[in-house]
Image (cartoon, rainbow, N blue to C red):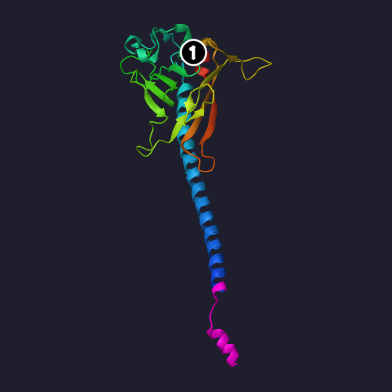
Amino acid sequence: MDNFCKIRRRGFTLVELLIAMAVGTVIMAAVYSAMNLALRFSANTDRKVITQQDTRAVLDLMAMEIRMASYNPTMSTIWSTIPSNATTCNQMGLVSPVPANKGIQIANANTILIAMNLNANNTIGAAGDENEYIEYSYNANANTITRNVSCGGDAVILGPTVTVPPSTPTSNVCNGSNLCNGIAGAGVSLFRYYDKGDAGHPEGHELLAPVNIPLIRSIQITIVTDTVANDTTTGKPRRMIYSTSVIVRNHAISP
């Protein structure tokens, strides 16, 4: 009995303390690694979700407005008036309207200019005709997509200068052949155009440059974006691709 009490009073030996400390250190390191991994995963997810939300919102807006190209409720021939103030709006790239092109006056890989007669007054772009012609463009140098409404000037709707919250860029646009965040561009056109197709190609034949605008029946919009911040796992931006197809029915049926 006395020997047992003496053993208990001795406490832990140095070896036992070192072993306990080593085990504790291993456990703490494992917990820290797990927490750090979870935080990094959460940060990556947040960046990806923000970029997804921004890009999807822009894609939905573009699809909604481009779908209205050539809208003409009066079914009258009005397209020679698009846009009425073209001479004072050189940044939209339209020297003079082409009546045969109706509500799609410019259609190339990275720019589209559409028009629509929203208020049924048989004019486009005149006083009171707000939002009746819209231009979307991809700027390869700035990695941005811009929107120009009724010669109001190019407004960036996606890219480095779009900040949420302020001073915190959310995404870089990577269509085309530019460098995006140090990564070679995706080489993807913002817009691709298709005709009505035939029995062998019901989805339509792609119209290559120069696009024969009167034949356009559908437009594929593709946006390639990178997260601004690098992924904490790969050390590179996370790249995402979003695409949708728009049927321009009004362009087909409008005179």
Residue range in magenta is: 1-15
> x%, y% of residue 239?
53, 33
Q: Is residue 91 magenta?
A: no
> Which part of the image, by quadrant, shows the N terminus?
bottom right
> x%, y% of residue 106?
46, 13
Q: Main secondary structure of the magenta part?
A: helix
Q: Is residue 8 left or right of residue 112?
A: right
Looking at the image, which residue sits at the far right? 200
Nearer to us in this view, 174 or 17: 17
1 above or below 249?
Answer: below
> x%, y% of residue 205?
61, 15
Residue at image mark 1? 254
Amino acid type assigned to the residue bearing label 1 in the image:
Ser
223 above or below 92?
Answer: below
Looking at the image, which residue sits at the far front? 14
Q: Is residue 5 magenta?
A: yes
Q: Is residue 73 left or right of residue 241?
A: left
Disc 1: CA contacts within 10 A as few (<14), some (14-19) or many (>=20): some
Which residue appears at 56% of the width and 13% of the height?
208
Which residue appears at 57% of the width and 72% of the height?
15
Q: Is residue 87 visible to us here? A: yes
The image quadrant of residue 138 is top left
The image quadrant of residue 131 is top left
